[in-house]
Amino acid sequence: MSDLPPPLAELIDDFTSVGPKDRLQLLLELSEELPALPARYADQPDLLEQVHECQSPLFLAVEVTDGVVHLFFDAPREAPTTRGFAGILHTGLDGQPAVDVLAVPDDTPFKFGLAEAVSPLRMRGMVAMLSRIKRQVKEQTGG
Amino acid sequence: MSLPADPSPQLADFAHPDRLVTTDWLAEQLDAGTKDLVVLESDEDVLLYDTGHIPGSFKLDWHTDLNDPVTRDFVDGKIFAQVMSERGISRDTTVVIYGDKSNWWAAYALWVMTLFGHPDVRLLDGGRAAWQAEERPMTRDEPTAAPADYPVIERSDAPVRAFRADVLAHLGRPMVDVRSPGEFSGELLHMPDYPQEGAIRGGHIPGAKSVPWARAVREDGRFRSRAELERLYQTEQGLATDDDVIVYCRIGERSSHTWFVLSHLLGFPQVRNYDGSWTEWGNSVRVPVELGEPDE
């Protein structure tokens, strides 16, 4: 895991060092810690990209400033799993260099031991969020 | 012994009023500490229960508790017995299930429990949303149950479950497609705003009537009255209570809801849910598919 951004690698350690039930608790905590949208997005939701692969509506925005990635997410309270996935990516990738975010392997969502806790079918949303984040970072860095 | 039915007058007109309970009734039973009653929450989102649930209720997740982890099928009798036992449910327990999205997943769980012939399983009318709208108590405390003795029952699929071969043999007889109009016509391969579920072809099974499941519920998530439901399925769609009916959707969850309406609220004795649904039919080689909007 040496290639992953350190906060993301730490989260993987946190999730995989506990059993499936505690993994759900961690996911719930991350869903609750997901920051609200700043006003510039909350007032202009059309600036956000919808991740259609998620079970529940999820919207995201990506900004790259001086080579550093910033992520913004919006998902309803009634969709804690989707919010939790967003929380993992926010905690793990926000503030990281664009090159490091682009280097995150596409199958990283499966490294958290969550497929077992939430079922593989539900993991698709997180895979899609990561790929859309990487695509936007690539576009904004002229990649 | 199962508990007496909820005597509320708003349920009395339904064909099987003992399959539905009101939020008032459930609250009374919980306040009274009624024994032999277990409440289960079954949601689309696996974490929703953990954000708060009806005090004393247990989570029953359709993916992780009811689906076989390997084969596309439901769990077997042994695992089902364990799932029930862990939640303190025995064969004599009255089970009330509620959930999000007007009880989609709750109805699905009820239907799966029916495959195992659990004698007394009911839905909470209006589900999670109705309970919350009335500002009734919710908690994050997870109950613990003394394991109950639940027998290993062999699932009996035939009465309420249809497989692909059953549907092929049923062509020309009544079928209800409960998906959205766009899915029925073939324009969409998945629910609006939902992920692509991987069907190769779009459309519907020839001859199926289009009755989106949500037409059976009111805005507050509760079921429509018997008279309204009769108008919808019998007058408008021409179904008769003695028809042999197959219902389907995408993976069998929304159609469990309609299966519940036809079987328990309107009293159709012969309704089967085709849980393979469009994710099987739309991928099957050389089965007939029809495109276009429903006939008027």
Image (cartoon, rainbow, N blue to C red):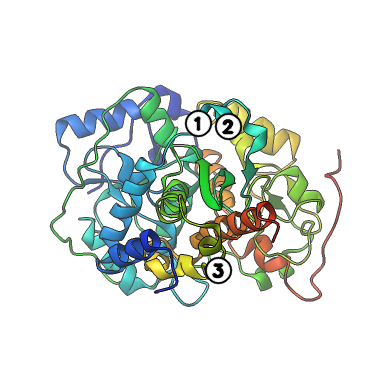
Q: Viewer-nearest of labels 3 and 1?
A: 1
Question: Residue at left 13%, top 57%?
Answer: B146
Q: Earlier in the sequence, mark 2 or mark 3?
A: 2
The disc numbered 3 marks a residue on which chain? A
Relative to A136, B150 lies left or right: left
In the drawing, what numbered circle is on residue B77?
Answer: none
Q: Nearer the viewer, residue B69 or B164?
A: B69
In the drawing, what numbered circle is on residue A106?
Answer: 3
Residue type for callout 1: Pro
Residue type for callout 3: Asp
Q: Nearer the viewer, residue B268 or B78?
A: B78
Relative to A133, A37 lies left or right: left
Q: Nearer the viewer, residue B146 or B114?
A: B146
Residue wearing tag 1: A38
Residue wearing tag 2: A41
The tally of labels here is 3
**Which element is circle 3 on?**
loop
Question: Residue at left 32%, top 63%?
Answer: A10
Question: Residue at left 86%, top 43%?
Answer: B295
- What separation in Å lies between label 2 and label 1 (alpha carbons)? 6 Å
Q: Position of residue B65 (x, y in %)?
A: 37, 63
**Which element is circle 2 on?**
helix
Q: Position of residue B128 (x, y in %)?
A: 40, 36
C-beta proximity under 8 Å, tags 2 and 1: yes
